[in-house]
Image: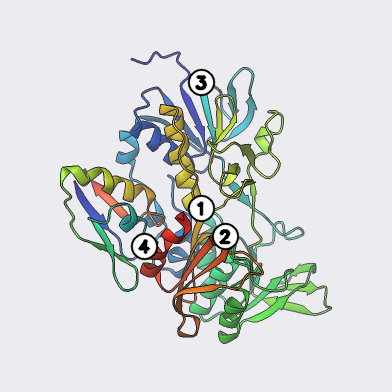
């Protein structure tokens, strides 16, 4: 039986990575106390549908919930929402929050990442971001009222937003400082395919430009660009990435440059672990420390750390995986497509808009992408295991 | 155990068919197809693994 004084395990961050840790710990037989604290007021929810089903209006916000309250009760957690960590003392093994000091035997850092804002747009009501459930609901409401929008950032999130704008019949302009759209881990191989989709849907594209200034007027917002042109829309959506939530660890002594540095088991320091968007794990495949902002990594790292704490066993390193849907095209990506190597077509044909492609270098498959061919993509995954 | 799948949420990643091919398959669009909604006891652990790994959280288990 656990005693009242026993500090047990503390998980800071009640989103997918932190919650998966708790599930994994219990599934692996961990019986001590687990405290899970989360800064947001919502029950843990899934982020990927925010820019897809929620934005399109197909889903209510509540449909993104990861599990019901009953499921959480089965995990026997001390669950506290609306509580945020503000400091960590590694030597005394205590987390300070806005309401109390929590001692721990083991700590899991799962504080995620926050949206990166565009400097100079603070307080502008026409500027939206898309990171939280509340962001998504606000943006959806705005999309119902406008006829034009400017999207800053042509990454995967920006591209999904642009695709949603077209569904709403909204005239879109995209700005990016890069010369072309960028999907993560794809080595630039899909830049022209994504751009073609934009052009086909009459999106105005402004690549390779910096933003000199942003001005909010009564009914629109204007961006002055470094090529001496300007673009205007009724609203703007800024999708320029995320920053790991490590401010509260500033005096902890942990290495927090671009996320909490961890070994391949998620260990940041003795009895301290990190998972999900906030973590930068050493990857045994690429031999580099990588911070991965995708849902599958959050799940896999949560499972791995739970198992490691409960049993001492390591889990195998996985290839990063993400998916997207842009203008109805289902894109699945495993591993890392290499830039500068031509794609090998494994199934289908790019001209039919259905294919599976890979980059193969020195006989090793480094990445596979499925474009509207999910089943063949799954069948091709074994190429990565060779 | 009873399994329910949400084909609206499914993104066709195929993780379920990868780890529990006797319970889950994919149709021509890659979307999940349930081969059985009541797996026998020896397959329950595989169903759990599939639900945990599903990146779209489209698999629900009622125990």
Whether marks 3 and 2 lie on the same chain: yes
Q: Is mark 4 on a helix, strand or loop?
A: loop
Callout in the foreground (3, 1): 1
Q: Write down the chain letter for disc 4.
A: B
Q: Which label's residue is closer to the chain start, 1 or 2?
A: 1
* Label pair 1/2, CB-CB below 8 angstroms: yes
Q: Distance between the residues labelled 3 and 1?
A: 31 Å
- Give the quarter of the figure containing the N terminus of chain A: top left
Residue A332 visible in the current orientation? yes
Q: Distance between the residues labelled 3 and 2?
A: 37 Å
Q: Distance between the residues labelled 2 and 4?
A: 25 Å
- Furthest toward the front, the residue is A362
Q: Where does the image place residue A260, in percent across and percent down from the top left?
A: 63, 38
Residue A138, numbered circle: none
Image height of B10 relative to A19, above or below: below
Whether marks 2 and 4 lie on the same chain: no
- Residue under pointer 4: B9
- Residue under pointer 1: A319
Whether marks 3 and 4 lie on the same chain: no
Q: Residue at x 51, y 53 (%)?
A: A319
Q: Distance between the residues labelled 4 and 1?
A: 23 Å
Q: How far apart are marks 3 and 4 (CA)?
A: 38 Å
* Label pair 4/1, CB-CB below 8 angstroms: no
Image height of A239 relative to A199, above or below: above
Q: Write down the chain letter for disc 2.
A: A
Q: What element carries label 1?
A: loop
- Residue under pointer 2: A336
Residue B11 visible in the current orientation? no
């Amino acid at each position: 039986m656990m005693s009242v004084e026993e500090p047990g395990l503390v998980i800071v961050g009640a989103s997918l990575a932190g919650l998966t840790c708790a599930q994994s710990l219990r599934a692996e037989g961990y019986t001590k106390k687990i405290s899970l604290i989360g800064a947001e007021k919502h029950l843990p929810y899934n982020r990927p549908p925010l820019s897809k089903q929620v934005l399109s209006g197909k889903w209510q916000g509540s449909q993104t919930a990861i599990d019901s309250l009953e499921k959480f009760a089965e995990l026997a957690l001390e669950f506290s929402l609306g509580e945020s960590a503000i400091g960590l003392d590694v030597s005394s093994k205590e987390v300070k929050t806005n309401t109390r000091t929590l001692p721990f035997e083991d700590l899991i850092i799962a504080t995620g990442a926050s949206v990166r804002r565009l400097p100079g747009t603070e307080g502008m009501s026409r500027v939206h971001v898309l990171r939280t459930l509340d962001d998504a609901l606000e943006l959806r409401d705005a999309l119902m009222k406008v006829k034009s929008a400017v999207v800053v950032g042509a990454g995967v999130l920006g591209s999904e937003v642009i695709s949603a704008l077209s569904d709403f019949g909204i005239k879109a302009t995209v700005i990016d400082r890069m010369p072309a759209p960028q999907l993560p881990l794809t080595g630039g191989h899909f830049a022209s395919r994504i751009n073609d989709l934009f052009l086909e849907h009459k999106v105005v594209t402004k690549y390779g430009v910096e933003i000199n200034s942003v001005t909010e007027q009564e009914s629109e917002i204007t961006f002055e660009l470094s090529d001496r042109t300007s673009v205007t829309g009724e609203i703007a959506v800024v999708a320029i990435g995320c920053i790991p939530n490590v401010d509260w660890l500033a005096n902890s002594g942990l290495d927090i440059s671009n996320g909490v540095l961890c070994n391949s088991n998620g260990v940041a320091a003795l009895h301290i672990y990190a998972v999900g968007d906030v973590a930068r794990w050493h990857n045994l495949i690429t031999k580099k420390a990588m911070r991965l902002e995708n849902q599958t990594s959050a799940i896999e790292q949560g499972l791995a750390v739970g198992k490691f704490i409960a049993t001492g066993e390591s889990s195998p390193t996985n290839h990063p995986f993400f998916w997207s849907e842009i203008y109805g095209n289902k894109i699945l990506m495993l591993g890392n497509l290499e830039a500068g190597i031509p794609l090998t077509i494994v199934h289908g044909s790019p001209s039919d808009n259905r294919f599976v492609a890979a980059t193969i270098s020195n006989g090793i498959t480094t990445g596979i992408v499925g474009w509207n061919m999910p089943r063949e993509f799954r069948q091709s995954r074994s190429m990565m295991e060779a | 155990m009873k399994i329910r799948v949400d084909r609206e949420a499914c993104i066709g990643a195929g993780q379920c068919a990868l780890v529990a091919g006797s319970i889950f398959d994919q149709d021509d669009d890659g979307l999940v197809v349930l081969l059985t909604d009541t797996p026998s006891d020896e397959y329950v652990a595989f169903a759990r693994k599939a639900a945990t790994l599903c990146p779209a959280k489209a698999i629900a288990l009622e125990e």
